[in-house]
Amino acid sequence: MSHIGKKEILIPEKVSVTLDSNIVTVKGPLGELSYNSVDGITIAINENIISVTRKNDEKKYKELHGLTRSLIFNMIVGVSEGYKKELNLVGVGYTADASNNNYLLLNLGYSHPIYFEKPDSIDFETPKTTTIIVKGINKQEVGEVAAKIRSLRKPEPFKGKGVKYSDEHIRRKAGKTVGVGA
């Protein structure tokens, strides 16, 4: 059996989970998420515990067993606590401003500012002009939006300039002057 799939999920007090045929709906203080499960995967709710089982040991169902359990767990965490990713801007003049509710204004060393449109389910915060916090209830959307912002100016290996995750380590390369021999 799947090591992750066989773990039971405990439902917190402030979260309600409903099961309608194959559709799991999770409601919490931060919002509501739903997931349409595959036919071979069975989801059972007993009081405040969710268990996920599969109909047989085919490879397809083994793969979907752990995935389904993880997605439901991520939805529960998302509607109760939420997810966030922190990005840092490294470089002279690199700034971010989230004062407008419709977009994120980025100055990343190009000749023009970048207006990054804010998705409906995502919120931006800029506690400092060089820090961006991406918040939301859907783990996948938060990671996807953070990756799109990072792709606007990836960190380069020589000076480390660019947009990077706060916990990311950039491998630095030596410049030309170090390798020149006599």
Image (spheres, rainbow, N blue to C red):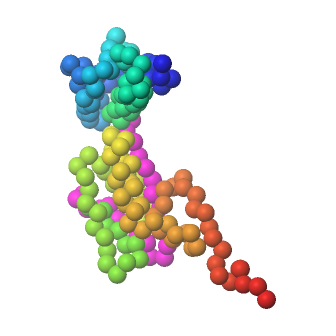
Q: Residue at x 21, y 19 (%)?
A: 21
Examine the image and state in which quarter residue 75 appears.
top left
Give the answer, above or below, for where 34 lies relative to 41.
Answer: below
Nearest the eye: 179 or 12:
179
Tell me where the magenta segment starts and ends, as one range.
80-102
Task: Give the residue furthest to the right.
Answer: 182
In the rendered image, residue 133, in percent from the top left (x then y), is placed at: 40, 53
Residue 125 shows up from this direction = no
Residue 5 shows up from this direction = yes
Considering the image in quadrants, where does the C terminus appear?
A: bottom right
Examine the image and state in which quarter residue 39 appears.
top left
In the rendered image, residue 95, in percent from the top left (x then y), is placed at: 41, 69
Give the answer, above or below, for where 91 lies relative to 22.
Answer: below
Give the answer, above or below, for where 141 lies relative to 7.
Answer: below
Examine the image and state in which quarter residue 26 appears.
top left
Q: Residue at x 40, y 63 (%)?
A: 151
Q: Is residue 88 magenta?
A: yes
Q: Residue at x 47, y 22 (%)?
A: 2
Residue 138 shown left or right of residue 2 in the figure: left
Q: Is residue 96 magenta?
A: yes
Task: Give the residue furthest to the top.
Answer: 46
